[in-house]
Structure formats: structure tokens, C-alpha cells
Amino acid sequence: MQLIDANGKEIWVRAIGHAAFEDGVCKRLFGTFQNIDDYKLTQLSLQASIAKQEELNTALKEQVELVKLQDQTIQTIQEFKFLADSIPQIIWTSQPSGNLDYYNQHWFEYTGMTLEETQGWGWEPVLHPEDLDNCVKVWTESIETGKPYDVEYRFKRAADGAYRWHLGRALPMKNEKGEIVKWFGSCTDIDEYKRALDLERKISQFEDFNRMVAHNLRGPAGSMGMIINMLETTTEEEERAELLDMLKQSSGSLNQTLEELMKVLEIRLNKGIPFEECNTATILQGVENMLKGEIFSKKQLFPPILR
């Protein structure tokens, strides 16, 4: 949703809330607003960019269809080249064997390489080493089967050496006999889209962590509140002593929970932290304390196993 901040600016926020019930009646609402304005604006901008690129892809496909129907004249080739160079993404063609024989101007500007350097399979040095094997595998399969080419990979940009994600797609042009005579392909920069997906994943993880924190703190804190209420109403020394002991255990459980949550944060920031063995008996003791608090609050008798 959108809200207006103190400066009168409209910003995008994500609302997350929790309702607290007592005896089936909602007593209080807890909630937060997360500022996702940068993420939302990036998402909207990305969607508009993708839509524009799809329009350009459609225009390219229409031009390719015209090339199929027209004679392969010099004028037609020049028109296609002009169109390809006007599109703000990489356009290429390949022979049926898979050897690339044409790139538009954007390829040379992005990679800093010449046509001679990248003809055939000379494009391999541009790819990120981790993406090369999969790219070759998918491209080889398309060449052998005629299946449309569709793959995501990272290209190295000559200007700064940065690797940016691209979506590679290609379709085969066939003759009357159904034989492939040419491949027409494009590489679209989707780096901002991939970053937006990563940001969305991190936001989702943060929301999960918030829910985990609320869940882990609710038990000990609620148990301590109930024990304090019972201490205020009871006058029997034996019962007060037992309640104080339970209060100490709940307090210890709460402190331990907070320490464990801090460890979770440290692990999220530093994956090199070693694992520790958990003590099942300690966990069960904490559960038992919470259950005792619930039983005391309802003025019920302890079963023999909890005495």
C-alpha cells in the first residue's frame, strides 16, 4: 500500500500485523510498516523496462518475418542491420551449425571485442565461468533438436569488468522442407530484475525472522506474566516459593531465547560460525515451565508427570 510520510511524499510500505486474542476476543493488534519504497519503485521501473523490451522484441520478430518473405537484397539486409543496431540489447544470428556470424553494434560496445574475435564460438570468454557449461549445453541441445533457445547467464562488461545477468533467447528460421537455415537470437539485460528478486527474497527472510522472534518470545514472556499475576493473588508461602522458582526458570528461558536469537543474527551475518549441539533436556524443561504457567492460570491440578 501507499502512505504519505511527514514530508507529504507518497511512499510504498508493507503492513505486517498480529492479533492478540483472549477467550476468543481480539484485545489488541500489533503491527509494523516496512518501507519498501525503493524496492517498489525499482520493481515498477523494471516492469516498465521489460514491457518496453518485449515491445522491441515483437518489432524484431515482425521484421524477421518480413525478411523471410522478401528477397535477400542488400536493402533488406541494411534495414535489418539498422533495426538491430537501434535496439538497446544484443542481437545475433547463427548458422545452422551453431557458429555465430552476426552481432549488432550493442554487442561490440558491451564486450569490447571485434567480430573476428567473437565469430563462431569466440563468445565463450564473455560468459561467467560458472555459467559457461550450462550455456553450451543448452545451445548444443537447441542446435541438435531445433528447440527454441532460452537461458540465463552473466556477461562480462568491458567498461568495468562487471558481470551482468542476461536472458538469451533464439528461434530457428526454417525453409519449406522444415530445415533450419538460420538462428536469430537476442540477449536482454535482466540484471536489475535479478537484483529485485534477490531483494524480495531477503525481505521475505526478514519477515520470517520477525515471526520467529515473536513466536520464541511469546512463550516465556506470557508465562512470566501469568506467574506474576498468581504471585499477587496467593498468600501461601509454599505456593509462592514454587511460583518464584518457576518465575526464575521462565526468566532464564527468556534470556536463553534472546541469546539464541542473537546467535541467529550472527549466523546470518557470518556463515562461518560453528554449529553447537542442543540440549534436549533444557528444551523440554522450558516447555514444561510454559505448560505449568498455563495450568496455574486456569487453576487446574498438575498431572503426576508434571509434579
Image (tube, rainbow, N blue to C red):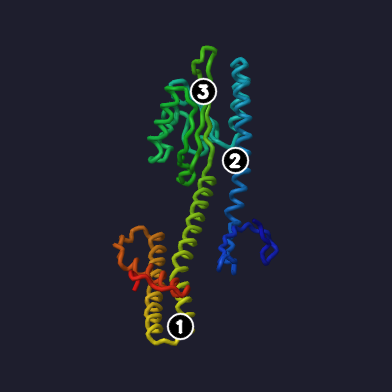
| Label 2 vs label 1, nearer the camera | 1
Q: Nearer the viewer, residue 297 or 275?
A: 297
- Could you say which quadrant of the image residue 59 lies in? top right
Residue 180: mark: none
Q: Height in image: 90 above or below 253?
A: above
Task: Report how far apart the C-alphas of labels 2 and 1 lie in the structure.
Answer: 64 Å
Q: Which residue is mark 1?
A: 231
- Would you say the residues marked 3 and 2 are in contact, meaning their CB atoms lie under 8 Å apart? no
- Spot the residue most to the right: 8
Label 3, secondary structure: give it. strand
- Would you say the residues marked 2 and 1 are in contact, meaning their CB atoms lie under 8 Å apart? no
> Quick one: label 3 or label 1, which is nearer the N terminus?
3
| Label 3 vs label 1, nearer the camera | 1
Q: Nearer the viewer, residue 111 or 206?
A: 206
Residue 172: mark: 3
- At label 3, counting other C-alpha atoms closer than 10 Å, the crowd grade (few under 14, some 14-19, many 20 or more) is many
Task: Report how far apart the C-alphas of labels 3 and 1 lie in the structure.
Answer: 80 Å
In the picture provided, is 269 more to the left or to the right than 197? left
Q: Height in image: 242 above or below 153?
A: below
Q: Which residue is mark 2?
A: 50
